[in-house]
Image (cartoon, rainbow, N blue to C red):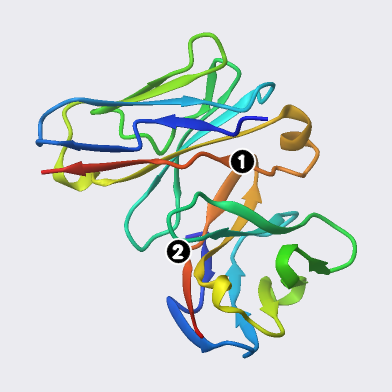
């Protein structure tokens, strides 16, 4: 079945550590890719998006993601996390008018 | 600009009772989505509207779920009767036509309605 897979369910890091959250999808053809973030008690917010062009996209709060078409991946990265990055992160793929989400990765950053 | 507004934020009901959720999208956003988010999972699409037309309701459990968007603006999602497994957060999102078909389908989400069925 076609899907969006996030590799880690829960990631725990110390402040200043580097972050990489994996995302793979199984849809062929043209897709648009997104990372959304949900801070505790808040609604889903767009972190960054990829449509075309440069496969390395930069988002808010120092996050970036790299689209690797051959690997069907769109991994999220941040060089140095902060306590305030504690949140749940969702990868999403737009295909045919639908936005399909992965199961989410909970990130806990220890101060 | 007001965001996507949903109500109620929280609802606790007994099983077999009906429940309804309301969503008011961002002004000018013609496309409206209802998603369900179970605990520890990503949101799953229930239904998508383009104006007042439901263009994708393939994931909506039609035996007990219904939705409407009569004037192409606000929308209501109803469950009747509710079951224990319906406990979840029901999310509404919207986007404008330009965003939806230009490849830039950036959905703006509401805060969600958390349903607990006892």
Q: Kindly state the secondary structure of the residue where label 2 is placed.
A: loop
Q: Chain of mark 2?
A: A
B60 and A63: which one is in front?
Answer: A63
Q: Kindly state the secondary structure of the residue where label 1 is placed.
A: strand
The residues tagged by marks 2 and 1 sit, at their Cα atoms, a distance apart of: 19 Å
Which quarter of the rendered picture does the N terminus of chain B lie within?
top right
Q: Which label sits in the foreground, 2 or 1?
A: 1
Q: Residue at x 50, y 49 (%)?
A: A43
Q: Position of residue A107 (x, y in %)?
A: 49, 75
On screen, residue B95 versus residue B55, left or right, reads right
* Residue lying furthest top: B71
The number of numbered badges drawn on the structure is: 2
The residue labelled by disc 1 is B108
Label 2 packing within 10 angstroms: few (<14), some (14-19), many (20+): many
Which quarter of the rendered picture does the C terminus of chain B lie within?
top left
A81 and B40: which one is in front?
Answer: A81
Q: Position of residue B41 (x, y in %)?
A: 39, 60
Q: Position of residue A98 (x, y in %)?
A: 59, 43
Label 1 packing within 10 angstroms: few (<14), some (14-19), many (20+): many
Q: Are marks 2 and 1 on the same chain?
A: no
Q: Residue at x 69, y 21 (%)?
A: B28
Compared to residue B81, the image places residue B116 above or below, namely below
Q: Chain of mark 1?
A: B
The residue labelled by disc 2 is A103
On screen, residue A32 versus residue A19, left or right, reads right
Q: Residue at x 59, y 65 (%)?
A: A26
**Which of the 4 quarters of the picture holds residue B93?**
top right
Compared to residue A25, the image places residue B109 above or below, namely above
């Amino acid at each position: 079945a076609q899907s969006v897979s996030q590799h880690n369910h829960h990631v725990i890091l110390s402040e200043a550590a580097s972050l990489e959250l994996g995302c793979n999808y199984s849809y062929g053809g043209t897709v648009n890719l997104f990372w959304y973030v949900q801070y505790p008690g808040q609604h889903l917010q767009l972190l960054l998006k990829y449509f075309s062009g440069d496969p390395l996209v930069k988002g808010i709060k120092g996050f970036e993601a790299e689209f690797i078409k051959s690997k069907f991946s769109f991994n999220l990265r941040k060089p140095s996390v902060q306590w305030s990055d504690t949140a749940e992160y969702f990868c999403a793929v737009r295909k045919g008018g639908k936005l399909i989400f992965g199961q989410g990765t909970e990130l806990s950053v220890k101060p | 600009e007001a965001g996507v507004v949903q109500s109620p934020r929280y609802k606790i009901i007994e099983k077999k009772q009906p429940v309804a959720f309301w969503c008011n999208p961002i002004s000018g956003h013609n496309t409206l989505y209802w998603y369900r988010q179970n605990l520890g999972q990503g949101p799953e699409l229930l239904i998508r509207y383009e104006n007042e037309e439901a263009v994708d309701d393939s994931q909506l459990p039609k035996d007990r779920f219904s939705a409407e968007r009569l004037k192409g603006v606000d929308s209501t999602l109803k469950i009747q009767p509710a079951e224990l497994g319906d406990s979840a957060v029901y999310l509404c999102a919207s986007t404008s036509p330009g965003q939806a078909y230009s490849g830039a389908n950036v959905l703006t989400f509401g805060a969600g309605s958390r349903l607990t069925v006892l």
